[in-house]
Amino acid sequence: MRRLFAYLVLVADVLLTSVLGVESFNETLTLRPLVGGRVHAAFTFELASDASSIHHFSLLPRPLLQPVASLGVQELRLAMNKGRWMYEEWGSPAPGTLGDDGVASGAEVWASINNDTEMWPRWRVLTSALASVSCASLDGIDETTTIMPNYPYFGTNSPVVHAYLTSESVCTENISPLLKLLPCKSGAGLASLIKPHSILQAEFHGVSLHVRQINSVWHVTIRVHVVKRPSQRQDTQWAMHDLFSAHLEKTCPVSTSSQVHVRSSTVPEPAVQSDESLREEQEWTWDDEEDEKPLPYTVPMSTYTYDTRAYRDKGLNVAFVSNATSPLLRPPPLRASRQVLGHGQEDNKVHLTLRNDMPAETVHVMYYEHLPPTVLPLLHTLHSDAQVDDYDEADDMVRFRDDVTEPFVVNATYKPPKVRKIMGFMELELRVPAASTLTVTYTLKKHMLHYDEHIPDPHRGMDLPPAMFTPLGAHGTLWSQEHRHLPVYHVQAPHLYTTPGLIDMVLPDFSMPYNVILFYSTFVALFFGTMLNHLLRRYRDVYVKSRMTQ
């Protein structure tokens, strides 16, 4: 009887394992210094499961995976940020990762759908499901505000849809629901350090959600980015309690691993041994002695790793120093910006500036822009010009004539927006010569809007979504991926986002109709009131007896 019972327990365990699969939960907190005594805190929560059923999970969030899997979504990216990420001073927002660097202000959604059959109805259902999960206004996204870009920015062959909500702001209602997707919620583990009110006071903060399926294994990644700034620009002693208004007291019992990585040039407290395998600046070896060694981009720092499960009894409150000087020895070699110039209905231009500091490498950059239905770019006004650096004999650089004479716009994909109906997009593959600054300009035509088509608070202007610049490699992959064996990989972001823009639109006098209505209503009321008073009133003599006669 006991053997039969043990056999049944073994069979039940095998069946349960085949249904639930093998699941894991890893959480990581990375603290690294930035210029001016700032600190960049990056929370990463990774969940994985190879379960064959989407209805039975022990760790992964079923409210998220069930709509994603049932709608045929292979990959999903959601990012909500507030603030501006300073690429020149802070480097990459996610060093060592390719693609999880969405820091555009507002809300951004990417989705890879397996086929085009009834894609737009499924897209509406997906955005509604994401709106309920994140408590954001994502249900306002529809086919009129969604773009299907031509270039595969994240290396997928399935149709990709992309949408922005520029005016969406991160609040406590967005952070708390995403933390509830974790196994321990925000009650234990590193998620207990995320206090929404403390996070929203940061100079830059954002949350992101990444869901993908690789070889029938589901991967869910939740990230929280925070950049804290001290009151004064000086060397600052930071501690967990100063950053998050709390310190780690309880660990998540179901976590596979829970670690805190501190990047610092000095030993933090409590003291631990540095992890040399995580050093960004390594001793690079070269077979050819004539080749120049790559330039370092960061000051030498060590990574100190804390296993939070070893501090479950006494708690963990890491303290370290962030210097006022920048940890970057030089800015990232590839930088880009966008400016919208002009006012009124005429003489409006978009000015793009791309900088390439690489001394002997021409880089191709993909420029990706959303075009609202209220504007229309005039491609015949597209103009590009490159300003190369002066020749310096000490650099030993040879520049060919083709670098300057060949066209700087290599390829272009343009889908014009339909006026007052559907948003369009534009993709330009730009060639940026070595050690040069490329400028691209084109004229932007604004449409006259009808009286009832203006958005609330029209004097603020119309939102122009952020533009994205993607440096491309020689083999069609990301430039950062091809340089992952060099020190520049840790400071150069795979995608560069610009700040959102505001388009100044010509506005009518919205108060004039109301003033006219009120004036004529008052005039008519006074006129007809007086006329009716005179027409309906009856006059007669009234004799009043005097007291003298009495």
Image (tube, helix red, strand yellow):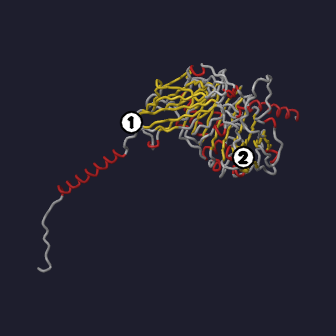
The residue to which callout 2 is attached is 323
How far across and how far down the image is residue 387, in percent? 57, 28
Which quarter of the picture shows residue 22? top right
Quadrant containing the N terminus in the rendered view: top right
Q: Is residue 377 visible?
A: yes
**On-image quarter of the C terminus:** bottom left
Q: Which mark is residue 450?
A: 1
Instruction: Give the camera-side residue of 388 and 95.
Output: 388
**Residue in view at x 65 percent, y 50 percent:** 198
Residue drawn at the location 74% of the way across and 38% of the way down: 25
SS at circle 2: loop
Is residue 547 shown above or below 64?
below
Percent from the top left, x then y, of residue 91? 67, 37
Q: How much space separates mark 2 and mark 1, taking CA atoms? A: 54 Å
**Dot 2 surroundings within 10 Å: few (below 14), some, or many (20 or more)?**
many
Residue 38, numbered label: none
Q: Is residue 474 left or right of residue 451?
A: right
Tell me if mark 1 has few (under 14), some (14-19) or many (20+) residues whose alpha carbon lies within 10 angstroms of its own.
few
Question: As shown in the figure, which amino acid type bears the numbered disc 1?
Answer: His
Q: State which quadrant residue 217 falls in.
A: top right
Q: Would you say 125 lies left or right of 215 here? A: left
Expressed as whole percent of the image width and height from the top left, the position of residue 406 reads 57, 19
Residue 95 picture location, percent across and down = 70, 35
What residue occupies the far left of the structure in this picture? 549
Question: Sequence-wise, which precedes: disc 2 or disc 1?
Answer: 2
- Three-letter code, disc 2: Asn
